[in-house]
Image (cartoon, rainbow, N blue to C red):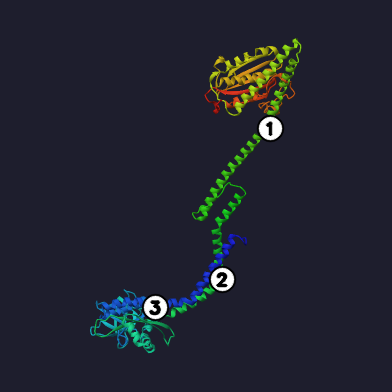
Amino acid sequence: MKRHSVVFKLFVVTSLLVLLAFMVVMAAEGLFFERFYRSTKISRLAGSMESFAKQYGEHPNEEERVSRLLGEYMNRHDASIAILNREFAQLHYEPYSIDLRTPGGKTIKVVIPTEGTTREEIPQLQIGDQLTVDGMFMDQLDTIMNPVNIRLSEEASSEPDLGLVRAEGKVIDLLLPELNSRSYNPYYQDTLIDDAVQAWRAQRSDASASETRLLQGEPVRFEWRDPWSGVEYAMLLQPLANEGRTGPRYMVALSSLQPVGEAVDILQRYVIVLAPLIVVLVVLLSLMFSRIVSRPLLALNRTAARLAELDFSAVPEAKSKDEFGELSRHLARLSRNLDEALKELTHANRQLQQDVEEKRKAEELRKELVANISHELKTPLGIVKGFAEGLQDGVADDKRERYLAMIVSETDRMNALIMDMLELSKFEVKKVQLHPRSFSLTDLVQRVSESFDQQLDVKGLRIELKPSYEAGEQCPVPEKLAVWADPRRIEQVILNLLSNAVRHAREQSTIRIALHRDLDGKTTTTIENAGPSIAEADLARIWDHFYRAERSRDRKSGGTGLGLAIVKHILELHGSEYGARNTEQGVAFYFTLQNKENPNGGETHDET
């Protein structure tokens, strides 16, 4: 664990906070718990006394009912309760009793006196037990007994002691101090009520004020320590409603405060013993908590580090629905967006580089075009000027006709160059509109070939036309080899390519024109001559303006240097594939056309 990591900081902070909270709780327990316990117990006892006062007011003169009510309240609140008269003397009630049903069906109430009785003298009883009681009856009907010995029937002696009467029967009802809710010796505590009242009356400085509060229905609180046992008690006095003429009555409750002091002392000792274990548990739990909480944060940190290195692949997303999960999903979406943006930017940058390269090439071509145009026009202009000056100087009549013929020839050459330049400029500015239709490519090739008869005769050349379908079979009806294109522009393509083939063919050779249609309906036209080949480095540049593979050729070999550039633009408008390759005989030029409308998405442009 790194010292400056989030896990370490979270671990330290969590451990310190938990330990600090633990120390605060222990300090508060030592300082305030006992006081809080006393206040809470007295408040609850006061509230219960108000409830008792209401129930007592309903039956104030029914001694048996009031006695049972006192016993139930003492068990419920672990307090000794008594009823006082106007002189604060305790009225006689016996809250504890056992009802027996004898075998003869008689019911005997065994009254348990509070004074002088200990918990050990009363066995643990429950309804249905068989009980034997030795004592004395207190009424003439022998239904109320003051017990001396109380034993379960199986534990009782064979005969009662001298002067005592034995009663045996089944317990049908009982009200005794509950072992789980009362003090160690509730019988002894019940006898302390008179002592506590006397101590209260002896110590109060303002008797009239206390009596006024009691008359107003407010309880009076007093803390008293038993001089014999040293146990502290809380005493509360509550006025009771009394509809009789015996004067006001009061309810007094005495509750021990000793258990809380012992509990706090034992708890403090227990915490001191457990303190090392608690510290170890806090450290371990803090470490686990810090790792669990920081785990998604560490994963996000690793993801961010990968994003910083422009690695947008496999970005993990947290599955939780909290802020970490939401942050992870946002980070994943950011990664995908950045990846797409970077790809688009890379593509745009590549396109920009291509555009810059094309612009650079276009600038070079422009410079080369200006130089070529200057060269191409300078020579014929020089010739025309020379012959014109000769005519101006009055040359001999036999040379006059030859000079005029040369002037006309060079003028025709300049005119052809200018017309090609105008034609090429239309293609470059996208101002050419195609007018495609279906026509016979075979007829077009034959018609163009016939226009070269004179040039073919001069060099002793011949043209061989071979149309074919699919796998190379001879086409039975050549006229059926139809294509969809602009016939005037395709005628211009064939004318330029065939003129180029004738110009560079060896004398007495054959120019082969092959028309082949494949299974997809695409027709490939190939024009091959027998002559010098083109260097591989020049095959891609022969379509540029004024580019000639033979740099040192004689200008009389013909051509303006713009024919193949025009061919390239026409074929690109048709969406055709085109190119040139060297063969065993010489050079072959080829291009493709479709026999369906708008093949390959060919473009059309306005011609102005």
Q: Residue at x 59, y 62 (%)?
A: 8
- Residue 419 in the figure: left or right of residue 44: right
Q: Which residue is mark 2?
A: 276
Mark 1 vs mark 2, foreground winner is 1
- Please tell me which residue lies in front, 606 or 143: 606
Q: Which residue is mark 1?
A: 364
Q: Are marks 1 and 2 in contact (CB under 8 Å)?
A: no
Placement of the C terminus among the 4 image quadrants: top right
Q: What is the crowding at mark 1: few (fewer than 14 residues within 10 Å), some, or many (at least 20)?
A: few
Secondary structure at numbered mark 3:
helix
Marks 1 and 2, how far apart in space? 87 Å
User: Label 1 amino acid?
Assistant: Glu
Q: Quadrant of residue 352?
A: top right
Q: Which residue is mark 3?
A: 42
User: Label 3 amino acid?
Assistant: Ile
Q: Position of residue 296 (x, y in %)?
A: 55, 55
Q: Position of residue 248 (x, y in %)?
A: 28, 84
Q: Quadrant of residue 239?
A: bottom left
Marks 3 and 2, how far apart in space? 36 Å
User: Which mark sits nearer the N-terminus, 1 or 2?
Assistant: 2
